[in-house]
Amino acid sequence: MSRTEAAEACAKDLIVTGQLGALRSCGLKRGAGRTPEIPVFDPYTGERLGAVPCASAEEVRQAVDWAMAYPAKLTRHQRASVLEGCARKVRERMEPIARLISAESGLSIHDARYEVGRVCSVLGFGAQEVLRDDGQTFSCDLGVPTRARKVFTQRFPLQGVIAAITPFNHPMNQVAHKVVPSIASNNRMVLKPSEKVPFSAMLLADLLYEAGLPEPMLQILAGEPGEVVDALLAHPDVEMITFTGGVAVGKAIAQRAGYRKLVLELGGNDPLIVMDDADLEEASTLAVLGSYRNSGQRCTAIKRMLVHASIAEDFTARLVEKTRAFACGDPMLESNQMGTVIDAGAAKRIAERVEEAIAQGAQLLHGHLREGALYAPTVLDRVRPEMRVVREETFGPVSPIIRFRTVHEAIAIANSTAFGLSSAVCTNRLSDIDRFVHGLHVGTVNVREVPGYRLEVTPFGGIKDSGLGYKEGVQEAIRSFTHLKTYSLPWGEA
């Protein structure tokens, strides 16, 4: 069986093309043969894997109306059971799910398995958070005059519907980060996945339904981005929009959202800062993993390597050696650590940006080879901060090296872009760590780790063009997806 045949068989084993339960959940009466389809292609082979129905603006409105008509009243026990049950189903089918993710996204099978494991973690943390008491109590004898009362707080789900929009780079995990907090907080959600990778999102929805989730609480609608997003923004019952994706689209959504809750995660340009006292073997290993995992298509991927001039030659030699050994190609082959980027157009844009940097004086040390959606891991030296390859977010497996001489200079270079998501620092000096933690304009500083290190439950998000400051992570997302109500009662004697 060929690779494409295996991928198609995997997809058909998990979903019935064009008749997904997640599409049926919308309660829409679709006429036979009338609904236009969105084809889904294998980025590596370019062959068609299948198709999903393309939702119209009217169907988006119907989906929101159906959600609004459903009173979500699941108990904490029921919500926890749904999330735990789905986690079990995902674990039981980990390998075929990973192969589906790899087939529609081009991610290596290793990265796809890692993604499935993260989805299980999100579901597990969500089930735990459901059972956590989310209120606070304040005694009213704290000030003068004292009162015989107590003040209580309690979180309630939103009154309207949450609209969620997810990107292509984590086909199922990004969806889980929206869906799990919504279920945990008893909300109703209409989610539009990237039209490039809809199968993973719809499969997760089907597994949640099998675990007992009422279908109106989660609907997945694939469609043309502009039409679906316009319909969601136009609906008066959409109370909140949570979006992960590009800056331009995120800012356009913010301008049109009006008086609604917004959570925007808009990408990053994350630096790895390597100081002169760093363990260079450790630092170069982190550099490779941080740059090339997920084909470099992560908001927290290392996009810039700021290396102290005194150790730059040694670090660069190690980085090139490890990059040469980082095998890329057919995503389904166990011997390959990296697959493709999302499509040939994305690979071409990455190559053009690298070409521009080379023309401006950057030195190509390895890589810069493209075949379709495959773009080889690439190392550039002698990069300057003003070059577009590091000034903007280059969403792919590129390692640009910028040299610096002082902590002050490193902080200034790191802060010189419009983004402020995450960062990584390789040093053992506490004084330098303190300066970076306080000086870097980012949401996260990881010491002797990649910028993307996180737990699914910890706060995650950035500032500047990386987002509005609201955090993802199960706990923080639940807070964003709820209203906090305060009430007080007479308590004890005056």
Image (spheres, helix red, strand yellow):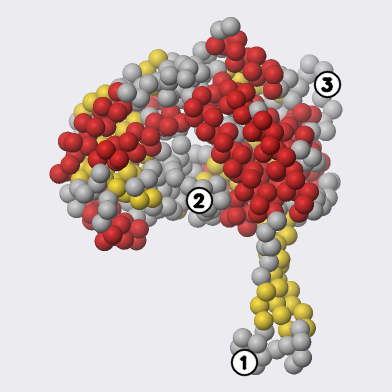
Q: Nearer the viewer, residue 299 or 283?
A: 283
Residue 305: % across, % down:
29, 40
In the shown orientation, is residue 387 left or right of residue 20?
left
For mark 2, does the 10 Å Cα neighbourhood hold few (<14), some (14 to 19), or many (20 or more) residues?
many
State the image quarter where residue 224 is shown.
top right
Identify the amino acid type marked 1: Val
- Give how far across and how far down residue 65 sits, in percent: 80, 42
In the rendered image, which residue does mark 3 sit on? Answer: 31
The local secondary structure at tag 3 comes to: loop
Q: Give, as a three-letter code, the residue at label 2.
A: Phe
* N-terminal-most mark, 1 or 3: 3
Q: Nearer the viewer, residue 400 or 12?
A: 12
**Disc 1 packing (10 Å; few <14; some 14–19; many ≥20):** few
First in sequence, mark 3 or 2: give its number.
3
Judging from the image, what secondary structure is the residue with disc 2 in?
loop
Q: Which residue is mark 1?
A: 144
Quadrant location, the C terminus:
bottom right
Spot occupied by residue 103 in the image (x, y as percentages of width and height): 56, 20
Contact between marks 1 and 3 (CB within 8 A): the answer is: no
Does residue 347 appear to the left or right of 126 in the view shown? left
Q: Is residue 178 visible?
A: no
> Mark on residue 75?
none
- The residue mark sitting in front, 1 or 3, is 1
Q: Quadrant of residue 261?
A: bottom right
Give the residue number, with chain letter if any, for mark 2.
460
> Which of the two labelled residues, at mark 1 and mark 2, occupies the earlier sequence position?
1
Kind of residue at badge 3: Gly
